[in-house]
Amino acid sequence: MEQTLLLIKPNVVRENKIGAVIEALEKKGLVIKNMKMETLTKERAEGFYDIHRGKPFFDKLVEFMTSGPIVEIILEQKNCVEYTREVIGNTDPEKAAEGTIRKKFASSLTENAVHASDSVENARKEIAFIFGVDMELTS
């Protein structure tokens, strides 16, 4: 089984939609293997999104991701990274397919409800960053 990281972003937490997002994930057959809630510090958010450092949206993203608590989840399923990205939909909620998490819960391109790892390699790195462990991930 493969694992990936999913973050429920501050706007969804503020709107009390955590349960609805988790229900949507579980209805699609994704299994929660670990979960916690955290309010990211500026340094931790910058570290997590370091790949985007220097891009025009970086500072706004860090500010948003530190604006309140997030829910951090390890999901598991066969072909989990790719499947989870299908379930959550396009980064831009206006372009996201009907029924996807971002279509249902995103406020905007920046406040797009959730983050999910985009590759098995990044899933491994992000899970280690968030949960402080190096998970064995296989496909």
Image (cartoon, grey):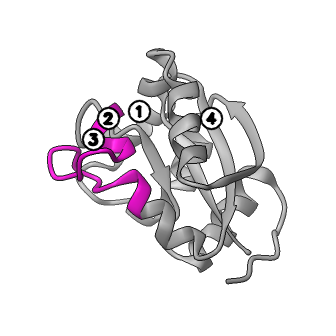
What segment carries the magenta color?
A: 86-105
N-terminal of the pair, mark 1 or mark 4, is: 1
Closer to viewer: mark 1 or mark 4 = 4
Q: Is residue 6 left or right of residue 57?
A: right
Does dot 4 land on a helix, a strand or a loop?
A: strand
Classify 10 Å Cα crowding around label 4: few (below 14), some (14-19), many (20 and above): some
Is 63 in the magenta? no
Classify 10 Å Cα crowding around label 1: few (below 14), some (14-19), many (20 and above): some
Badge 4 is on which residue?
71
Give the residue type at disc 3: Lys
Q: Is residue 16 left or right of residue 100?
A: right
Q: Which mark is residue 103?
A: 3
The x and y percentages for residue 85 are: 43, 62
N-terminal of the pair, mark 2 or mark 4, is: 4
Closer to viewer: mark 2 or mark 1 = 2
Is 98 in the magenta? yes
The x and y percentages for residue 109 are: 24, 43
Badge 2 is on which residue?
104
Give the residue type at disc 1: Glu
